[in-house]
Image (spheres, rainbow, N blue to C red):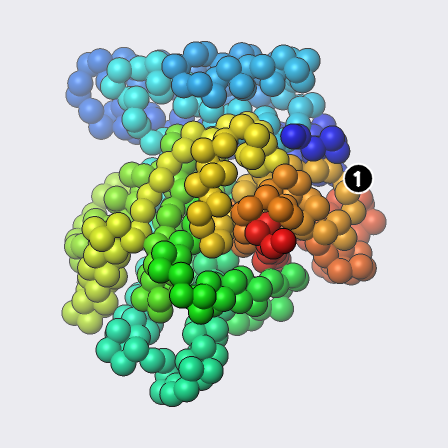
Amino acid sequence: YDTKTPQYKTSDPTSFAYVSARERWPVIITQGIDDVHRSTWQTKDEETVKEGKWIVSELAKLKYELQHDRQLSPLLDDGEPDILGYNKELEALGNPKWHSVPWLFSECYLYRRISTIFSQTQKWKSYDIFARQKMSTFKSSRPAVLELAAKYKDIVTELESKHTLKGAKTEEEVEAAEKVLFNEMMEICLWGNATDLSLLTNLSYEDIQKLQGSEARKASEKNIIVNDLGKAFDVLTAAKHSGKKERRLDIVLDNAGFELFVDLILAGYLLAAGLVTTIVLHPKSIPWFVSDVLPGDFASLISALADPQSFYTSSDDDNDAGKATPLTDEEVSNLQFLFQHWSGFHAEGQLVLRPNRFWTEGGSYWRLPATATDLLEDFKESELIVFKGDLNYRKLTADVSATWPATTPFAEAIGPLGPKSGVRVLALRTCKADVVVGLPEGEDERLRGTDNGGGSSGARKWAWSGKYAVVQFCDGKAS
Ligand code: F6P
Ligand code: MG
């Protein structure tokens, strides 16, 4: 059930894996050390301080092993069933070293290993080493959040009061208006992924804002190099017309903060427009790839919206929000509208959070049908499964290396989740890694020829920065 095609490895000098293992990961661990350090000094509890120091030393050890190209050591059993799988895989890979190991597996191992350090403590078991970064980046996206909140309130109010959109009268007009908004919401949701903390480690306030406004979105439309949104809209409207009462859409989440915010904007729109009746969100269970959503991030976001004024203006030691301009009454009311709307859906069971340890295993989603049968059966109940972000895309396509041309059809590249799987897949992905499939003939070559596209170096550099995106669909329910 696994792909037989070789995957990207950290030893491949032309891949982003190479840079990741040598430059990016040590920085991520260092930031983690700083974070724990800070929390340690903020407490007076002796045991917490003692354990905090121990965590720092374990993280330093991990960083040393990584930078000195040592073997990936077996994971300590913390009682979760995935440990066995990780350790078996290490053995099957011949106990590899950090600088010559499949990229996908080793990057997952890195976060899983960090998690085992915390689970060995008493006081830090549920500590999220990346929570600070996630929240402070969300704070920095204030202008885009306010813009979207105002827009959301307008759309939803219009939908709920008149049951129609933009003055549309006939059924065709309503559907055309719904389609325009569907595309826009999906695109917001797509580009929300471009502000991912694991990649953009030193993003400035201005950089974040540039990536998020509606102007930026319009300018980026040409950078969606494959766009199957129309097909996704068609399956949702077909289900609606079929008279089916329960129509569910799933989102396999990626990052917290601004991206989760826009995922909820999309979810709220789909529910309010009646395009679906339930949305199931799939978060991670342990701190993952720096910015991924944990259930706690969902709770923090909702409570920030419940009292936005104090969220944006209260001072903490992480940023200078204390000096921020207070929100206007209208801005407060727009944000509280979101809070009420989303908590309403949540309370009614229409917006559900469903964690599963499968998401933090080390393998690709080619394994899903065989090893996560519970998930597969659950997914079959859904009209559409939206996979957000780069890592989900790498896992869908098994991170297969350059031996697969970029023209390989998406349906083929996702293996057992492809045709006849019983599951409909939609990937919304800004490209931050080498693997790309489903491109038209000649497109990869054209993009390599652009500025910083990689040229003749052999590296697919255009796909590393989040500038380009693909939206790809496969109907595994079609007969
Ligand atoms: O490309 C850098 C990287 O950290 C990848 O290793 C990983 O796949 C991705 O970014 C995470 O991005 P996202 O949050 O979009 O999945
Ligand atoms: Mg992520």
Residue 369: x %, y % from top left: 56, 35
The quadrant holding residue 4 is top right
* Up/down of 164 relative to 46, above or below: below
* Quadrant containing the N terminus in the rendered view: top right
Would residue 156 appear left or right of 368 to someone viewing this image? left
Residue 390 in sight? no
Asked if disc 1 is less than 8 Å from ligand 1, the answer is no
Residue 300: x %, y % from top left: 26, 45
Residue 120 in sight? yes
The residue identified by callout 1 is 403
Q: Residue at x 58, y 14 (%)?
A: 88
Choose between 413 and 104: the one closer to the eye. Answer: 413
Badge 1: residue crowd in 10 Å (few <14, some 14–19, many ≥20):
few
* Up/down of 435 relative to 156, above or below: above
Residue 360: x %, y % from top left: 47, 31
Would residue 447 appear left or right of 159 to someone viewing this image? right
Would residue 381 appear left or right of 54 to someone viewing this image? right
Label 1 secondary element: loop
The quadrant holding residue 267 is bottom left
Choose between 317 and 3: the one closer to the eye. Answer: 3
Choose between 401 and 194: the one closer to the eye. Answer: 401
Q: Residue at x 49, y 50 (%)?
A: 385
Q: In the image, what residue type sits under mark 1? A: Thr
Choose between 348 and 67: the one closer to the eye. Answer: 348
The quadrant holding residue 131 is top left
Q: Residue at x 20, y 24 (%)?
A: 43
Q: What count of labels does the image hold?
A: 1
Residue 438: x %, y % from top left: 70, 54
